[in-house]
Amino acid sequence: MLGNSWLVLIGALALERIIGDPVSRWHPVALFGRAIEVLVQRAPATGTRRQFVYGAVLTIIPVLAVGLGSAVVLRYLEAIEPWAGLLVGAALLKISLSYRQLEKEALRIADQVGAEQLDLARSSAQALVSRPTADLSEEGLVSAAVESLAENLSDSFVAPLFYFVLLGVPGALAYRAINTLDAMIGYHGRFEYLGKFAAKLDDLVNWAPARLTAYLLALGGWGFNPVAAWQIARRDHGRTESPNAGWPMAAMAGVLGVRLEKVGHYVLGDGDRRLTAERVKEAAGIARRGAFIAGALAFWASSW
């Protein structure tokens, strides 16, 4: 399917660069999320086993529907008009990518911190991290933005490209569906058993991309400390609750020579550089170079 995969990739990367990931209630991911919310409202109110089974079905069927449905559509379009298949394939692959918008949000926080508009920065940070932001200090805001840049490089760019190379556009879309489900229900609290299957599946599919992202951040860290990126990633990755998020975040801490902290949860790195707005901009540059390398590798692999 889509023998010219490299053309699909170029189109998707161009769309990501030009339009980013605009916030809209009509965005396909937003529509997917609203459909899942309807199903979540029908979840069993009691019974951990019933909730787990319902959550597993709630994960498997939408993911298969997204992956297989997109495969059928693309095969049909390719059969009647190859260019239509390529254009739609590029648009669908773009849906799985959302890093540019997240970078813009992190840089907005950097600008607000730099202007000493901490209340605005705390409000902006709510769009990037799940932790409470109302009392975050300047250093806490910078740490949150830098961590988000590293983690989202993996989740929103490297992982979709990884599954595009392995499984084509349907693989990238299926990954995005899994990641969205995990973000919606894969956490402790009310949805703990309902979302346990989605959370474990997300851990599984992110295992390789997270570690690959740590390498990419080291490669993108020329001019800083690329050797420390991998050293700190190996040492500190297990400090986060997620088995994957610690790899890119610890790598970023190492390459920047900073100490990233989510108070009460983890500390990554032991560098002594002060966390200022400039660190966010440096992290964005490192992540951008890592993304470029990821895109180049995906292009090379899809050109075989």
Image (cartoon, rainbow, N blue to C red):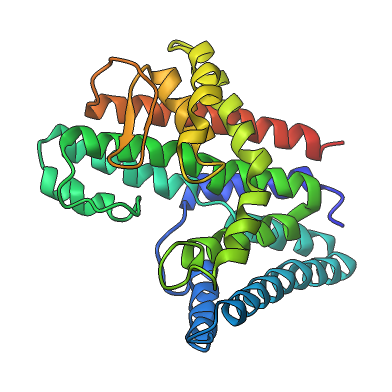
Query: Can residue 238 be spotted in the picture?
Result: yes
The image shows residue 103, relative to residue 46, as above or below, that is above
- The quadrant of the rendering that contains the N terminus is bottom right
Quadrant holding the C terminus: top right
Q: Is residue 155 left or right of residue 113?
A: right
Q: Is residue 103 above or below residue 173?
A: above
Q: Quadrant of residue 35?
A: bottom right
Tell me the residue at 58%/33% (across/down): 213
Determine the residue positioned at 70% across, 63% down. Answer: 88
Farthest residue, direction right: 79
Give the residue at x 62% y 65%: 197
Q: Nearer the viewer, residue 187 or 127?
A: 187
Residue 10 appears in the figure: no
Residue 46 position, x and y percent, is 49, 85
Q: Position of residue 181 (x, y in %)?
A: 55, 66
The answer to which of 268 and 294 lies nearer the viewer is: 268
Q: Residue 234 sits in which quadrant?
A: top right
Q: Position of residue 92 (x, y in %)?
A: 65, 61
Q: Position of residue 287 (x, y in %)?
A: 48, 31
User: Looking at the image, how many numbered discs can be counted on the residues?
Assistant: 0
Nearer the observer, 100 or 273: 273
* Side (left or right) of 174 relative to 156: right
* Residue in view at x 40 percent, y 67 percent: 189
Q: On the rendered structure, is 60 left or right of 1?
A: left
Quadrant for residue 268, please give it: top left
